[in-house]
């Protein structure tokens, strides 16, 4: 299944393949950069794993207990919810919310790309296909008639050369553009939820912990996104700077919305319960990023000892800070 999200390893595999093509064309000029890219790949993976450890410890040791405390500050009048784990339920809803958002973007993107591939196949097909029905099952049969008049100058009718890269063909440009647009939209959604997690924090300790984790994680994502956009810009006319601006503005927008929600909710009756539920939702989104994106993607490769150590280092730092500030 095609995934919109990506990690540092996939990013550098793409950039390395591009450099290898350049190296073969220039007689090995770019060969020395491969080891440097490999080292940088491990550094980015370690940073992302460190952010995953910070996320993990912050969610379980700080954000979730704080959400429970905010909900328990007010007496819930409904008998059914007096002893109900509302904070944990909010975490589940946060995970499911982000999962549904990512799946919807993925399905819409895949349908669009499949439709483009089907249109491109029909455009290159020298025969015209008509739908016939045989024993209740629809199928396609070729005929000798050509439904659309073609000209030699039409770029759709020209065969692809084996030497040309697929990304340089005009028919591939909409596909690449839509993939990058879907990628930026998905990352921007993540950034908005991360900003909400920052804006909903009510004390300085939690704010700093979440801010550090999100800053490290988003720095790796921003670097990887920049590499992919630089590669895409060579074969498309995408508004790269607009993509970067949207990705950069998503987190401040989420922070602003989170601050406004907390400010408005605290003035309402039972506002602490609302803030606690929203904090548990934000905790769920961070746990989704931790368990569905960072840890599976970064720890499944060979030579991931540095990433394991970075993960435990991130957990240890947050555990130490929580114990230090608690005293």
Image (cartoon, grey):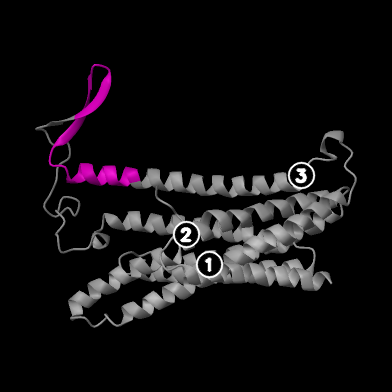
The magenta span reads 114-140
- Name above or below for residue 202 compared with residue 216: above
Q: Position of residue 110 (x, y in %)?
A: 39, 46
Between disc 1 and disc 3, the foreground one is 1
In the image, 152: left or right of 240? Answer: left
Please tell me in which quadrant of the rendered image residue 237 appears. bottom left
Label 3 packing within 10 angstroms: few (<14), some (14-19), many (20+):
some
Label 2 packing within 10 angstroms: few (<14), some (14-19), many (20+):
some
Instruction: State the SS at label 3.
Output: helix
Q: Residue at x 72, y 60 (%)?
A: 61
Between disc 3 and disc 2, the foreground one is 2
Q: Position of residue 150 (x, y in %)?
A: 14, 45
Q: Residue furthest top?
A: 135
**Marks 1 and 3, the one that precedes in the sequence:** 3
Question: What residue sits right under mark 3 in the picture?
Answer: 86
Circle on res. 308: 1
In the image, 135: left or right of 316? Answer: left
| Label 2 to label 1: alpha-carbon separation | 12 Å
Query: Do labels 3 and 2 touch, CB within 8 Å?
Result: no
Question: What residue sits right under mark 2 in the picture?
Answer: 297
Towards the viewer: 177 or 318: 318
Please tell me in which quadrant of the rendered image residue 256 appears. bottom right
Q: How many marks?
A: 3
Label 1 packing within 10 angstroms: few (<14), some (14-19), many (20+):
some
Q: Position of residue 283 (x, y in %)?
A: 68, 55
**Marks 2 and 1, the one that precedes in the sequence:** 2
């Amino acid at each position: 299944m095609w995934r919109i999200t990506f990690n540092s390893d996939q990013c550098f595999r793409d950039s390395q393949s591009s450099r290898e093509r350049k190296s073969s064309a220039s007689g090995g000029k770019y060969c020395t950069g491969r080891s440097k890219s490999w080292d940088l790949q491990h550094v980015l993976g370690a940073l992302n794993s460190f952010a995953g450890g910070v996320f993990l410890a912050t969610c379980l040791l700080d954000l979730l207990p704080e959400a429970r405390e905010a909900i328990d500050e007010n007496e819930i009048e409904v008998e059914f919810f007096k002893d109900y784990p509302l904070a944990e339920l909010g975490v589940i809803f946060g995970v499911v919310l982000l999962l549904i958002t990512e799946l919807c973007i993925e399905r819409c993107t895949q349908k669009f790309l499949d439709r483009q591939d089907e249109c491109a196949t029909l455009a290159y097909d020298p025969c015209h296909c008509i739908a016939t029905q045989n024993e209740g099952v629809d199928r396609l049969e070729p005929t000798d008639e050509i439904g659309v008049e073609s000209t030699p100058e039409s770029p759709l009718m020209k065969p692809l050369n084996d030497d040309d890269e697929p990304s340089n063909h005009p028919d591939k440009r909409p596909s690449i553009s839509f993939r990058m647009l879907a990628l930026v939209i998905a990352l921007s959604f993540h950034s908005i939820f991360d900003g909400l997690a920052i804006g909903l924090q009510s004390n300085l300790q939690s704010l700093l912990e979440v801010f550090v984790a999100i800053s490290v994680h988003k720095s790796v994502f921003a670097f990887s996104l920049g590499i992919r956009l630089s590669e895409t810009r060579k074969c498309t006319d995408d508004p790269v700077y607009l993509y970067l601006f949207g990705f950069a503005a998503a987190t401040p927008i989420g922070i602003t919305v989170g601050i406004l929600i907390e400010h408005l909710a605290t003035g309402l009756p039972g506002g602490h319960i609302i803030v606690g539920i929203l904090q548990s939702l934000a905790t769920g989104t961070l746990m989704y990023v931790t368990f569905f994106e960072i840890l599976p993607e970064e720890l499944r490769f060979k030579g991931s000892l540095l990433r394991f150590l970075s993960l435990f280092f991130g957990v240890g730092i947050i555990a130490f800070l929580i114990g230090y500030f608690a005293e």
